[in-house]
Amino acid sequence: VQLQASGGGLVQAGGSLRLSCAASGLSSRYTVAWFRQAPGKEREFVATTDWIAARYTDSVKGRFTCSRDTVKNTVYLQMNSLKPEDTAVYYCAASRRVLHGTSPLDYDIWGQGTLVTVSS
């Protein structure tokens, strides 16, 4: 399985971005998640989805939507009402071991990351 994240960029506060995670060789057995890492901080959980439901960290609930396109084998993170504190490198990750895991240790496969910068 390989993951390719894209869609990052520079946006003003209140704006929107959609991140994509294109997966090759990904089956329905995998949970896919988004994490982010701001400069000087640890990598933190953002959202995760299987084929049925999505879960989010509290700070993005109501603003971010994680979805999965089974035909394109792509997972999306739609980010609305962006805030400067959302600035980070965003990573997608996949796991067969843990369902809806929220720790980076739960995930074995990682994409390369895409930078999101939100200006105030």
Image (spheres, rainbow, N blue to C red):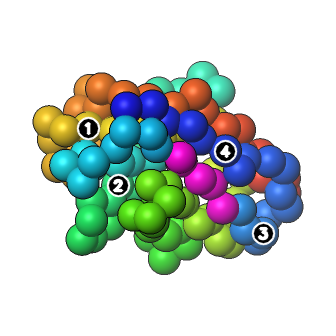
* x 46%, y 43%: residue: 23
User: Where does the image place residue 11, in percent across and percent down from the top left?
Assistant: 83, 57
For the stretch drawn in magenta, the main secondary structure is: strand
Magenta stretch encompasses residue 100: no
Q: Secondary structure at mark 4?
A: strand
| The quarter of the displayed image where residue 89 is located | top right
Q: Amino acid at mark 4?
A: Ser
Q: Which residue is mark 1?
A: 95
- Which residue is rendered at x = 65% and y = 27% of the image? 39
The amino acid on which the numbered mark 2 sits, given as a three-letter code, is: Thr
How far apart marks 3 and 1 lie (CA) works out to: 30 Å
- Labels 3, 1: front one: 1
**Could you tell me how far apart the alpha carbons at marks 2 and 1 are, in whole angstroms?**
10 Å
Quadrant housing the N terminus: top left
Question: What residue did someone put label 3 on?
Answer: 15
Query: Tags 4 and 1 in contact by the CB under 8 Å rule?
Result: no
Q: Tell me the CA gap for discs 3 and 2.
A: 22 Å
Q: Return the residue at label 2.
A: 48
The label nearer to you, 4 versus 2, is 4
Dot 1 amino acid type:
Ser
